[in-house]
């Protein structure tokens, strides 16, 4: 059944048959009343069938989306489903665009797109003061770092929130969608303007420890770390954990993440996998000289409930569009808290997907819960909740 409020409409289907699933999802959404329709497509679905089903919808409204490493909808965590979120025309104006050939990334082209989309929504709704941007990018492009930086430069004080498309845990090929057509090696940007109050948020349940390690050999272009502390990266990381190198797995990476401190803040730099030669492949770009700190997690379930309660501001929960890292879901599965966390996500009405990485303003991060919280228009508040955009120096070591 569809879920609707004054701010959003949501529908979903867990039917494994793609034709039946997308028909069910779209039948619950009134495209003509929507400024934007976002589709989160789970593993195993036929993308061509979805494209054909969306062809008519895309003539009536903006349609974007992506493939996922898991979905979030009614009931919390979902797998192999199709989830849709709709923003109504009465409260939102939207401009969307896309960037192809990310492997030949052109920062000027990305900035130009952001400028054009901002101009489009500003011209149509100059009296609506609140503006945010939502980004969906190919999760295997290795370009999210550059993309987030370039787009944020053009977006100015407008928050940028995004997620990297997934492919379950296969890491084979990911897709983003623009106007009903799926693409790889691409990114889709939506700029939203609204009278609603909007809060861009990012949080994680990790605390840096004093256990430091230095990246002594790495290739930022491929996100490979060859050496840590002058030793082969995989075995050295395992030694620090007190583990056998052959035990390294997605669960170990989720349970023992590393962070990079930037001023008083920290960013999680999650490990995707260990390669056959012992190098570590990260979800984010990483450079020689970076100082990494082993992080320790607090209770994932309690932390999520606390942060979502804070977003509720003591009243009714806002409408939340979330990008939740796949490593958080893996941790929940291994700690056997998936059902309880799903109940929290359901109670707070969260809609979104599990990602291969998250974008927050100028940075590409991992293992975070990142998103946009939409509140009803408030006559006393006509600006979005601001964030600190300063970029302090990152902790480094000479190598």
Image (cartoon, rainbow, N blue to C red):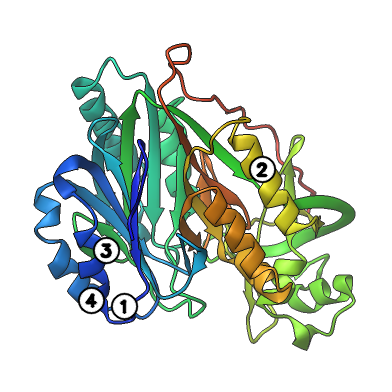
Q: Earlier in the sequence, mark 3 or mark 1?
A: 3
| Observer able to see residue 332 | yes
Please identify the quadrant where the N terminus is shown.
bottom left
**Closer to the observer: label 3 or label 2?**
3
Q: Which mark is residue 45?
A: 1
Q: Earlier in the sequence, mark 4 or mark 2?
A: 4
For label 3, the crowd category at 10 Å Cα-Cα, with few meaning under 14, some 14 to 19 and many 20 or more, is many
In 3D space, how far apart are the residues under numbered discs 3 and 1 (Cα atoms)? Answer: 14 Å
Q: Which residue is mark 4?
A: 20
**Closer to the observer: label 4 or label 2?**
4
For label 2, the crowd category at 10 Å Cα-Cα, with few meaning under 14, some 14 to 19 and many 20 or more, is some
For label 4, the crowd category at 10 Å Cα-Cα, with few meaning under 14, some 14 to 19 and many 20 or more, is few
Left/right placement of residue 54 relative to residue 318 reads: left
Marks 3/2 in contact by CB < 8 Å: the verdict is no
Identified at 21% across, 29% down, the residue is 120
Q: Earlier in the sequence, mark 1 or mark 2?
A: 1
Left/right placement of residue 327 relative to residue 37 reads: right
**Closer to the observer: label 4 or label 1?**
4
In 3D space, how far apart are the residues under numbered discs 4 and 3 (Cα atoms)? Answer: 9 Å
Identified at 23% across, 53% down, the residue is 29
For label 1, the crowd category at 10 Å Cα-Cα, with few meaning under 14, some 14 to 19 and many 20 or more, is many
Q: Which mark is residue 31?
A: none
Left/right placement of residue 392 relative to residue 187 reads: right
Q: Earlier in the sequence, mark 3 or mark 2?
A: 3
Q: Which residue is mark 2?
A: 307
Please say if 261 is above or below 263: below
Q: What kind of element bears circle 3?
A: helix
- State the image coordinates of residue 50 (x, y, percent, origin top left): 21, 70
Q: Which residue is mark 3?
A: 25
- State the image coordinates of residue 292 (x, y, percent, origin top left): 77, 55
């Amino acid at each position: 059944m569809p879920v609707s409020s004054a701010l959003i409409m949501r529908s979903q289907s867990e039917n494994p048959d793609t034709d039946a699933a997308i028909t069910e999802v779209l039948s619950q959404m009134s495209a003509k009343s929507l400024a934007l329709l976002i589709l989160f497509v789970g593993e195993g679905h036929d993308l061509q069938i979805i494209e054909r089903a969306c062809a008519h919808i895309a003539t009536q409204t903006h349609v974007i989306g992506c493939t996922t490493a898991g979905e979030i909808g009614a009931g919390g965590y979902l797998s192999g489903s199709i989830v849709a979120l709709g923003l109504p025309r009465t409260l939102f104006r939207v401009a969307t665009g896309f960037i192809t050939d990310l492997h030949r990334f052109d920062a000027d082209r990305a900035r130009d797109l952001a400028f054009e989309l901002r101009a489009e929504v500003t011209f149509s709704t100059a009296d609506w003061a609140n503006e945010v941007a939502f980004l969906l990018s190919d999760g295997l492009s290795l370009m999210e770092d550059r993309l987030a930086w370039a787009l944020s430069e053009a977006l100015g004080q407008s928050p940028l929130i995004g997620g990297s498309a997934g492919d379950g845990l296969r890491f084979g090929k990911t897709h983003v969608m623009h106007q009903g057509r799926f693409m790889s090696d691409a990114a889709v940007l939506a700029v939203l303007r609204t009278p609603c109050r909007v809060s861009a948020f990012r949080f994680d349940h990790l605390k840096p420890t004093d256990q430091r390690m230095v990246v002594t050999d790495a290739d930022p272009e491929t996100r490979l770390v060859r050496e840590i502390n002058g030793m082969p990266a995989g075995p050295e990381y395992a030694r620090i954990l007190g583990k056998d190198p052959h035990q390294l797995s997605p669960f170990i990476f989720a349970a023992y993440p590393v962070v990079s401190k930037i001023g008083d803040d920290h960013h999680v730099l999650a490990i995707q996998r260990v390669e056959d030669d012992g190098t570590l492949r990260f979800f984010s770009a990483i450079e020689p000289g970076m100082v990494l700190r082993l992080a320790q997690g607090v209770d994932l379930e309690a932390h999520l409930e606390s942060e979502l309660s804070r977003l509720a501001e003591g009243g009714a929960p806002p409408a939340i569009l979330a990008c939740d890292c796949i490593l958080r879901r893996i941790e929940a599965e291994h700690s056997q808290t998936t059902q309880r966390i799903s109940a929290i996500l359901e109670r707070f009405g969260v809609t979104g997907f599990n990602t291969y990485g998250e974008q927050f303003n100028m940075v590409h991060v991992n293992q975070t819960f990142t998103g946009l919280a939409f509140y009803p228009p408030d006559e006393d508040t006509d600006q979005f909740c601001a964030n600190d955009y300063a970029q302090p120096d990152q902790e480094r070591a000479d190598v």
